[in-house]
Image: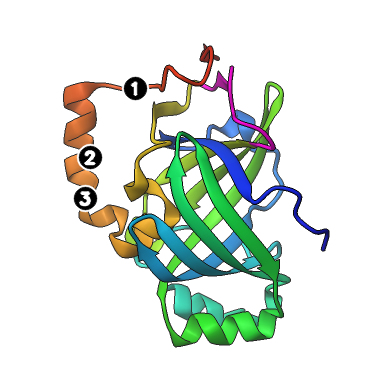
Amino acid sequence: MSEPTDDFEYERRFFCRELPAEYDDGDAPALIIQSYYVYTDNYALRVRLLSHSIQMDMTPDLDPIAVLEDNRERFSEAYVTVKGPSVGGTRYEVEREIDTRIAVELVKRGGRVVIKNRYSVWIAEDGWSVDVFGGPNAPLVVAEAERATPVTNLTIPKFCITEITDQPRFNNDGLAERPFGEWRDDFERELAKDGPHFQPYFGKNRMA
């Protein structure tokens, strides 16, 4: 694994209802199971496992630990990650690859677990990740554009309903602490009352 050149990630994130069919190229998404051992005040310590060979619908009754037990030999990548608070689409992040067998045992033994499918799509000049969550975070869908530098003058596809870049409750560590299913109705009422919002300080928002 190459050495990191920048200990910060730059991203913008959006709440979505779904990933439209025209953006699905037919490739299987990556299944991600990750456990958060620190998930308070926007600081995070995470162990993540990825598989590119497991296809699974993200339903509310999905048990991440059961999925892990049934498929432990099919995870091909694992990482331990440290994150700091996110400010203006910028967040401190340091990550190291670890043995998948160790990662499985760590996830089984502690932390708050999140499961999701991650789709990779190309929109305009940017690569995007679209996460479809299962278990207590279903039916949440979050789209994220990430660059090596601050994400400005972004082309935002129409399936992005509203921006959540600076809402920690939508961060994965926030979802580990308090799953989307616990506050989904409150959020929907907020969205109906206030309408969608897209941050104005990232240059020009180009709505596609």
The answer to whether 93 appears left or right of 85 in the picture is: right
Question: Which residue occupies the foreground of this view, 47 or 18?
Answer: 47
Which quarter of the rendering shows the C terminus? Answer: top right
Instruction: Check disc 1 and report the residue beneath it.
Output: 197
Residue 22 in picture, x, y percent from top left? 62, 29
Quadrant position of residue 72: bottom right
Q: Which residues are magenta?
A: 147-157
Instruction: Check disc 2 and report the residue beneath it.
Output: 187
- Tell me what residue is drawn at x 70 percent, y 43 percent: 26
- Secondary structure under the numbered disc 3 in the rendered image: loop
Quadrant position of residue 54: bottom right
Are the residues at dot 1 and dot 2 in contact (C-beta closer than 8 Å)?
no
Question: Which residue occupies the foreground of this view, 42 or 71?
Answer: 42
Q: Amino acid at mark 3?
A: Trp
Which quarter of the rendering shows the N terminus? Answer: bottom right
Q: Amino acid at mark 2?
A: Phe
- Residue 68 is covered by the magenta coloring: no
Residue 131 in picture, x, y percent from top left? 52, 48
Residue 186 in picture, x, y percent from top left? 17, 42
Instruction: Check disc 3 and report the residue beneath it.
Output: 183
Question: Which residue occupies the foreground of this view, 4 or 101?
Answer: 4
Q: Is residue 164 above or below residue 185?
A: above
